[in-house]
Image: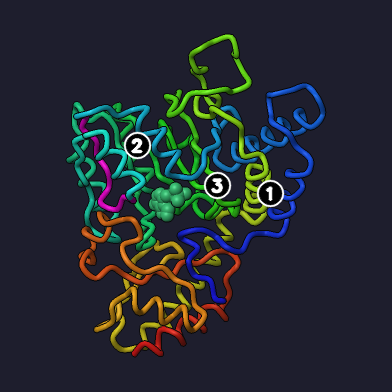
Amino acid sequence: MTYLDNGATTLRKPPQVVQAVAQAMGRYASPGRGGYPAAMGAAEAVYRCRELAGRLFEAEPEQVAFTLNATHALNIAIKSLVGPGDAVVVSGFEHNAVMRPLHALGAQVTAAGRRLFDPADTLRDFERAVIPGTKAVVCTHVSNVFGYRLPIEEIAALCARRGVPLIVDAAQSAGALPVSLRNLGAAFIAMPGHKGLYGPQGTGILLCGRAPKPLIEGGTGSQSRLFSMPEDPPDAAEAGTHNVPGICGLAAGIAYVLRRTPAAILRREQALLRQLTERLSRLDGLRLYCGPGQTGVLSVTAAGADCETAAAQLARRGVAVRAGLHCAPLAHESAGTLESGTIRLSFSDFNSSEDVRRAAWALAALQ
Ligand code: PLP
């Protein structure tokens, strides 16, 4: 199978990730729950993952909280800062993992920056939209539909100048772009462990620039006399038994990214994207959504073909892609593709030019 749905989850993982999960299952009990070797070993392994994530994202290990996925991390972040009726500014390219919690809270949401691949316009629009009284800004670093890289450093500087806390959704950038809690000065940065960090599904990270409010309450193995949750990260965000095998796999994934470097991974994905766009631009009837700085994600529409049907045809030819709205109707509304949806092809570090050739061949057969 040619797997080009890495924007959803990376299917191919470094072998050491799989080994780390299996090893942890046979070796570790729960961290912070005992002084015997299997519990102490678990605590060390979990802390090692915090250290590795801290190194990659320029954060202290204690600022790294483990979550189930990016959605869980975003829910903690948003519900720590936003209450009913609060004014929140988001980009025009947010995922439902941002929009639905805000909707459920009854926040007043303004979408700033609706133009695709136009960072200068995005920034100007944020400058207009972030006003006194704005309670928080929530912004994706990279659009999961189009690979559009938003000017997050400039948006972070704007938030700092105006004293508005920033939540960054790094779901599509972690592992491929520089993401620094220290440099961005964000209140929170949320990310999955199972995409560009090559960890298992069921893992995510919330980088905490400030204390998170617990989304759920329960045992943490710390401050056990209290009926209330500990107030500091990471414990405030980590009630209940950890996903120790998942976190060990995530540590192996992050170690892989640190060795390879995000810059080298991005270069590879962008090189594959260029090869793909070059091949596809020779085909009639395809519209490609491309722009400067694009990461390894490409959206395409095919004239006269419903994108879900087209994706099913690609699957029959052994090419796995995702079609439709990609849980991001706001992004499609911004780009004018809400009615049609798009076919999304997304690369990882494990794709090759052969995958590009097969995808182009399968898309050509749709004509
Ligand atoms: N935000 C963006 C931009 C995403 O692309 C995704 C997943 O596709 C999410 C959030 C949610 O991530 P998860 O599935 O890990 O909760």
Q: Which residue is mark 3?
A: 202
Task: Give the crowd class for mark 2: few <14, some 14-19, many >=20 residues within 10 Å.
Answer: some
Looking at the picture, tell me which residue is in the foreground, 214 or 51. Answer: 214
State which mark lies toward you, 1 or 2.
1
Q: Is residue 69 above or below residue 209?
A: below
Query: Splitting the image into 4 quarters, where does residue 288 fall?
Result: bottom left
Crowding around mark 3 (Cα neighbors within 10 Å: few <14, some 14 to 19, many 20+) is some
The disc, 1 or 2, on the residue closer to the chain's N-terminal end is 2
Give the percent coordinates (x, y) of residue 349.
58, 64
What span is colored magenta in the figure? 86-95
- Among all residues in the image, which is located at the extreme top? 225
Residue at 61% x, 32% y is 241
At horizontal 28% and vertical 38% (from top left) the residue drawn is 102
Identify the residue position indicated by label 1 in the image.
252
238 vs 153, left or right, is: right
Which residue is disc 2 drawn over?
A: 157
Judge the density around disc 1: few (<14), some (14-19), many (≥20) Cα neighbours within 10 Å: many
Location of the N terminus by quadrant is bottom right
Q: Are marks 1 and 2 in contact (CB under 8 Å)?
A: no
281 within the magenta span:
no
